Amino acid sequence: MTRRMALILGAFIFGSGVALAQGTPAEPAPPASGRAEALKALADSCSDHKFETMVVADGSGRGKRVRICGKPGQTDAEWLVTLRDSARKVEADQAMAQAVKDQIITALKAEIARVEILAKPAPETPLAVIAIPAEPISAPEAAPQYSSVPPLPAPLPRASVSAAGTAKPAVERPRLTIRCGLPRESFGECARLERETRILIRADEDVASGTSLRFLRGGDQRAELDLGPLRKGETLRERLPTRVCSGTLRGRVEVQVINKSQVAETLGPYALYCGS
């Protein structure tokens, strides 16, 4: 503890020796314990510029703290003078071990280099001078540029019309409710089709003949289920056509609602599983 305090106080004297030497010469020196406490209190109150480093003073490997405090209100430039003066005093101290000197001086040089950057005034940015002519500035206009435009495309063909000259009506979708389910299960939304899937078709209005469900796998028609005429509220339960699963284990299926040989709606695609 005594050696550690000696390092702290010795370094502290380097940084503020001038300030500590301003007492009256005839005034008696305080006791050693009182002086140590006073210097420790002064070191602990160091709130402006401060330098600290750890040095190894002996072979124990334990670090000793060295602190240098600047005078209150010092500028960066004045603090730089304090640091340089402290480095010179450490170098000239014959009583200090060379290994300790080297550690302190190395740390001081690094701190001096850092403070030099802070204390260096920022370079002034030269003002750019723009000469403005007295005469008005006129920019020459470029000659107009013309590009060749390709001919307009041929008009699109008109919508097909019947022999009577009226537009062909859109395909009307029959009002049907389609549900799917496996044996011994209730019918629900058709999310996946399997080999044993049952399909329930309910007519929400009278459905004339010529209405069917067409099953496509990979874009190719695999089967078609004729619904026939259905009265409103009538239901039809059919098993998934076997040809939908023919020659495959897995795939995807689309279901087209056919009305009068035309596609009125496409449902799906649904995942298809044809395993047993």
Image: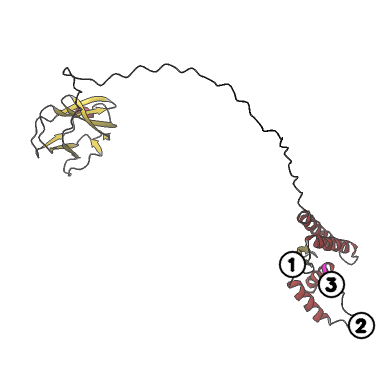
Chief secondary structure of the magenta span? helix
User: In the image, residue 28 lies at what x, y percent?
Assistant: 88, 83
Q: Nearer the viewer, residue 84 or 108?
A: 84
Q: Is residue 19 magenta?
A: yes
Contact (CB < 8 A) between labels 2 and 1?
no
CA gap between label 2 and label 1 equals: 31 Å
Q: Nearer the viewer, residue 275 or 163?
A: 163
Q: Quadrant of residue 34?
A: bottom right
- Residue 26: assigned label: 2
- Residue 19: assigned label: 3
Q: Is residue 168 left or right of residue 5?
A: left
The residue depicted at 81 percent of the width and 69 percent of the height is 12
**Which quarter shows the N terminus?**
bottom right
- Residue 254: assigned label: none
User: In the image, residue 157 lies at what x, y percent?
Assistant: 29, 18
Q: Earlier in the sequence, mark 3 or mark 2?
A: 3
User: In the image, residue 268 lies at what x, y percent?
Assistant: 26, 34
- Residue 48: assigned label: 1
**Which quarter shows the C terminus?**
top left
At mark 3, the secondary structure is helix
- What amino acid does circle 2 point to? Ala
